[in-house]
């Protein structure tokens, strides 16, 4: 696959992940407004998310969409801002792995309530 | 100096140079090209600049006037003068040969790089190709077909500035019109040429090209068309095949 075709696919992946993120952010905000009516405590959040597969699935989808979307954008910004540094690829991979690892750890955490 | 004189700062030199101020008599219905011509004929014959038709058909007299790329022949001084001052510089994003003349080779080579030229498979012995005027392809091609290659969009594009290998709005607009030319036979080759970060996918949709185009063409829309078409061709394939 040529670099240009790869870049076209990345562009497509970023647009699709943006659509998913748009929906996820909207749902996330609505849930926040709904959930904080009675105050916000860790116990309350965990009570809602612990053992709840729907929540876990939703937030993992959110994490995966971020994992695809953000690093592609950051790579483009770095490539245009610091074209000769060669930092775009390693920095965006580092960001991608961080988002996936930290995000998934958080999802497992709220699903299991820290039991794992 | 009479109180109707214009103070005109003109770029002198090549990449290295400076603005030199000239006093030019103010006339009614005076264009920026009239001002530059006056300076060269009456004040300093060593001033270099490029023009041909003087009526907005050839696209050779584009310059940066008061910070904005424009056709000087169709820009009246009264439209853009700030007090009594004008600043005239060569187009951005192109190497300066001398004074107000830029080297346009890279600009036109990028048209070639975007496969921005027609190739058919019919000969003079074949019947005329029939293109329905109301067909979607013809309408899309029509929207971008009037480009005369003046370079105003290219000089106004921030992405060209950030990515010197970016094909630029004019070349991509031409590629889009040809993509919608049902007689052309280099479609897949063209999609490959305009794919990726040196091509349509680097466009930030900032729209400076569309805002500045003297022919009111919308290269931003053409590039958006290419982005979708090329990305789909890379992932799912197109009517001409997969990239």
Image (cartoon, rainbow, N blue to C red):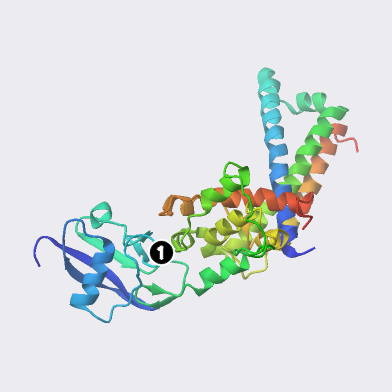
Query: Which type of secondary structure does the marked residue at label 1 adopt?
Result: loop
* Direction from residue A108 to residue A17 in the image, left or right: left
Point out residue B43 in the picture as x, y percentages from the top left corner: 19, 77
Q: Chain of mark 1?
A: B
* Direction from residue B87 to residue B136 in the image, left or right: right
* Direction from residue B173 to residue A11 in the image, left or right: right
- Say which residue appears at 88% left-offset and 33% top-offset: A112
Choose between B38 and B185: the one closer to the eye: B185
Instruction: Work out whether residue A50 can be spotted.
Output: no
- Say which residue appears at 62% left-offset and 70% top-offset: A84
Q: Which corner quadrant holds the C terminus of chain A? A: top right
Image label count? 1
The residue wearing badge 1 is: B59
- Say which residue appears at 63% left-offset and 51% top-offset: B180
Q: Residue furthest top?
A: A38
Q: Residue furthest right?
A: A116
């Amino acid at each position: 696959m040529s670099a240009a075709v790869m870049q076209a696919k990345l562009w497509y992946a970023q647009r699709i992940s943006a659509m998913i993120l748009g929906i996820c952010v909207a749902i996330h905000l609505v849930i926040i407004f709904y959930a904080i009516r009675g105050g916000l405590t860790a116990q309350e959040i965990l009570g809602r998310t612990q053992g709840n597969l729907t929540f876990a699935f939703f937030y993992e989808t959110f994490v995966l969409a971020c994992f695809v979307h953000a690093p592609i954008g950051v790579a483009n910004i770095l490539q245009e801002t610091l074209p000769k540094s060669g930092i775009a690829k390693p920095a965006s991979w580092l960001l991608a792995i961080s988002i996936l690892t930290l995000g998934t750890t958080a999802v497992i955490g709220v699903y299991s309530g820290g039991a794992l | 100096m009479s109180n109707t004189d214009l103070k005109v700062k003109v770029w002198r030199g090549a990449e290295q140079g400076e603005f030199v101020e000239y006093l030019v008599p103010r006339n009614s219905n005076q264009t920026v090209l009239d001002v530059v011509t006056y300076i060269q004929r009456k004040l300093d014959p060593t001033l270099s600049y490029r023009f041909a038709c003087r009526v907005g058909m050839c696209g050779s007299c584009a310059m940066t006037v008061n910070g904005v790329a424009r056709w000087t022949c169709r820009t009246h001084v009264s439209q853009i003068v700030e007090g009594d001052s004008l600043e005239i510089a060569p187009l951005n994003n192109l190497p300066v040969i001398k004074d107000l003349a830029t080297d346009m080779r890279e600009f036109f080579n990028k048209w070639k790089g975007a496969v921005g030229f027609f190739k058919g498979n019919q000969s003079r012995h074949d019947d005329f190709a029939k293109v329905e005027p109301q067909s979607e392809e013809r309408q899309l091609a029509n929207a971008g077909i009037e480009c005369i290659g003046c370079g105003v969009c290219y000089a106004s594009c921030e992405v060209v500035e950030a990515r010197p290998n970016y094909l630029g709005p004019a070349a991509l607009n031409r590629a889009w019109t040809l993509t919608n030319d049902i007689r052309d036979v280099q479609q897949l080759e063209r999609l490959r040429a305009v794919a990726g970060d040196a091509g349509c996918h680097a466009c930030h949709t900032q729209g400076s090209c569309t805002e500045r185009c003297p022919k009111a063409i919308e290269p931003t829309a053409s590039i958006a068309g290419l982005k979708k078409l090329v990305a789909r061709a890379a992932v799912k394939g197109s009517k001409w095949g997969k990239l």
